[in-house]
Image: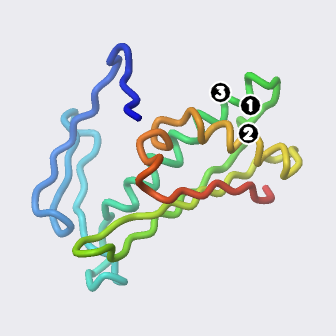
Amino acid sequence: MTNTPTKIVYTARATATGGRTGHATSEDGVLDLDLTSPKEMGGPGTGTNPEQLFAAGYSACFQGALGLVAKSKGLDASGSLVTAAVGFGPEGDSYAITVDLEVAIPGLELAQVQELAEGAHQVCPYSKATRGNVPVTVRAVEA
């Protein structure tokens, strides 16, 4: 299934050079950083890597979706924490990723948090983009 926006309201542009041991910049210059492989993959681990950037983007986007779902149910998720753990490893002749999302919302029962997290997983653009291709788990955890 393809999820296509009816209207593009924003386009992010970034350019990378040098792959995992290179440099990445956004078109507006706000993002400007060196990339290095993590120590676990034989690199120095002195810069960020694509998996960290994906985890940061996914967790931020998911938290936004979580807020929308909570608001629609009359609940406050403004104090929520979303942690995305992006795993990277061999798959066939190349590599693949996995994602584990942990969601905490102070003041709510775990069952409520899980329900909200599952709802967010249905509407989050990152979740839509990975669905059917990347294994993603969503789990409520204590705040």
Residue on which disc 1 sits: 70
Q: Amino acid at mark 1?
A: Ala
- Residue at 45% x, 55% y: name it: 55
Q: Position of residue 35 (x, y in %)?
A: 24, 64
Packing grade of label 1 (10 A; few <14, some 14-19, many >=20) is: many
Q: Is residue 60 above or below residue 49?
A: above
Residue sitting farthest toward the top:
7
Tell me how far mark 3 sits from mark 1, CA to CA: 5 Å
Residue toward you, 81 or 99: 99
Q: Earlier in the sequence, mark 3 or mark 2?
A: 3
Above or below 132: residue 48: below
Whole-percent x, y for residue 97 in the image: 40, 64
Q: CA distance from mark 2 to mark 1?
A: 6 Å
Q: Name the residue carrying label 3.
A: 68
Task: Identify the image quadrant of residue 90.
Answer: bottom left
Callout 2: SS: helix
Q: Residue at x 53, y 36 (%)?
A: 124
- Measure how far apart labels 3 and 2 are at the Cα level: 10 Å
Of tags 3 and 2, the one toward the viewer is 2
Mark 2 / mark 1, whichever is N-terminal: 1
**Residue 133 vs residue 71, the one in the foreground:** 133
Q: Callout 3, which amino acid?
A: Leu
Badge 3 vs badge 1, beta-carbon distance below 8 Å: yes
Q: Is residue 21 above or below residue 133?
A: below
Label 2 sits on residue: 116
Front residue of 60/126: it is: 126
User: Which of the 4 image quadrants contains residue 121?
Assistant: top right
Q: Quadrant of residue 141?
A: bottom right
Q: Secondary structure at mark 1?
A: helix
Q: Are marks 2 and 1 in contact (CB under 8 Å)?
A: yes
